[in-house]
Amino acid sequence: MSENNDALFREVDDEVRQEEYKKLWDRYGRHISIAAALFIAAVAGWQGWQYYELKQAEQASVLYFDAVAKAAADKPDDALAGLAAVSHPGYGQLAKLQEAAVLAKKGEVEKAVAAFDAFADAPGNDPALADLARIRAGYLLADTQSPDQLLSRLGRYDKDDALWHVQAREIFAISAWRVKDYAMANRYFAAIAADPAATQSTKQRASLMLQLIAPNLAAK
């Protein structure tokens, strides 16, 4: 008898649960269906957006590297036209930097510096790339600006822990050599020659300049 009662209770319990589920579905089934459909649509939309972003990046990379190849082939005008067509957020930033580099290669130094400065000051650009733009502009200006002017521009990098400190110091040294401030040039070139962060080629340039500077220091 006990077994029969247990079976009966289970059957009743199952029926009650089924009835509760039915009532819940009748009441909320439409909302659940809508929520499920929205979830599926959201997942599909996100995947579609990712695919779109990938295709955009692929197209931008083709345009960018094609323009870089034209610049390397000494076709600056074609390169500039191609770079101007790159609108992707990531490749677009690289294209702006490359545009400035192409202008510099063409000998249009003022335009190149203006382009580097505009990139460096534009909000939203990658900070590391903005720093690179300032350094590239500094190298272009080393032949015309005084050490004080360049220190005003790039003094923030004249620290051992700054990413571009070697390049900044080379810019200061070149400018100092040009205006015959041999003591300043010697100080910066010596710092570069002893800097473990400097590349071998940069150290070799610094060592060569130190040899050229030495007679001028001795004359004083």
Image (tube, helix red, strand yellow):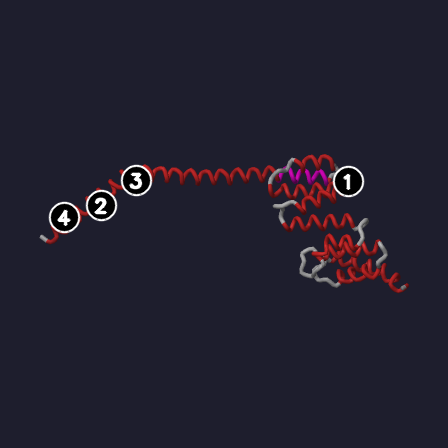
Sooner in the amino-acid sequence: mark 3 or mark 2: 2
Would you name the residue on which mark 1 appears? 106
The residue beneath circle 2 is 17
Amino acid at circle 4: Leu
Magenta stretch: dominant SS?
helix
Mark linked to residue 8: 4
Tell me the amino acid under the disc marked 2.
Arg
* Amino acid residing under circle 1: Lys
Mark 2 residue element: helix
User: Which residues, given as a range, are shown in magenta?
Assistant: 61-71
Q: Is residue 102 left or right of residue 41?
A: right
**How far separated are the C-alphas under marks 2 and 1?**
81 Å
For the residue labelled by badge 1, is the local secondary structure a helix, a strand or a loop? loop
Q: Amino acid at mark 3?
A: Tyr
User: How far apart are the two marked residues, 4 and 2, measured between alpha carbons?
Assistant: 14 Å
Mark 3, secondary structure of its residue: helix
Q: Is residue 65 magenta?
A: yes
Q: Position of residue 136 (x, y in %)?
A: 72, 49
Task: Assess whether mark 2 and mark 4 are in contact (beta carbons under 8 angstroms).
Answer: no
Sequence-wise first label, 2 or 1: 2
**Structural distance between the alpha carbons of marks 3 and 2:** 16 Å
Query: Which residue is denoted by mark 3 in the rendering?
Result: 28
Residue pictured at 75% horizontal, 55% vertical: 151
